[in-house]
Image: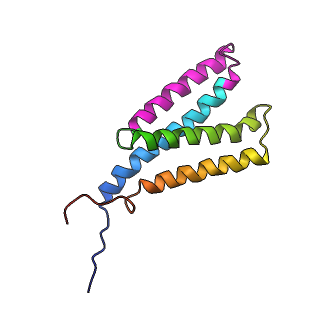
Amino acid sequence: MTTATHLPAPEAVEHKTAPWLALLAAGGFEIGYALSVNGSEGFTNPLWSTVAIVFFLFTLFFLSVALKKIDVGIGYAVWAGIGAVGAALLGPVFFDETLTLAKAFWLAVIIGGVIWLKLADSAELTPDTAPA
């Protein structure tokens, strides 16, 4: 008995990868947005406020691009997770904030959840709907 291995076509892999790269970019811009909003001191600092607005526009653009191909529940959770973890890790670097062991543990839980959400959207775990 032989079994055929189904390998996705390169364009199918690119089709699945591009939205996740856009979502990763959106998450990076979300981190920048969160940090710059903090630096804007309630939008009273014009430079930080302008930076926050720019990051906000970029994060929304890339999130909307990603959500064309990624389910909104998954995409939003991953985007928010990346933003939360990134802001929590970089907040102590740029501002007078602390990162305790308990915070680090729960951030690790968020990271684990984001990874599992990505795996749940992978081709290996998604049922194939194309006819054989």
Residue lying at the far left of the rendered structure: 131
In the picture, the quarter occupied by the C terminus is bottom left
Q: Which residues are magenta?
A: 38-65
Q: Nearer the viewer, residue 106 or 95?
A: 106
Q: Is residue 3 above or below residue 50?
A: below
Residue 37: x percent and y percent? 64, 24
In the picture, the quarter occupied by the N terminus is bottom left
In the image, residue 125 lies in the stretch drawn in magenta: no
In the displayed structure image, the side of residue 114 where residue 97 appears, left or right: right
- Give the residue drawn at x 49%, y 25%: 57
Residue 94: x percent and y percent? 74, 33
- Give the residue drawn at x 55%, y 28%: 55
- Give the residue drawn at x 54%, y 24%: 54
Which scheme is used to colour this image of the protein?
rainbow
Q: Is residue 7 visible?
A: yes
Residue 13: x percent and y percent? 35, 56
Most common secondary structure along the magenta stretch: helix
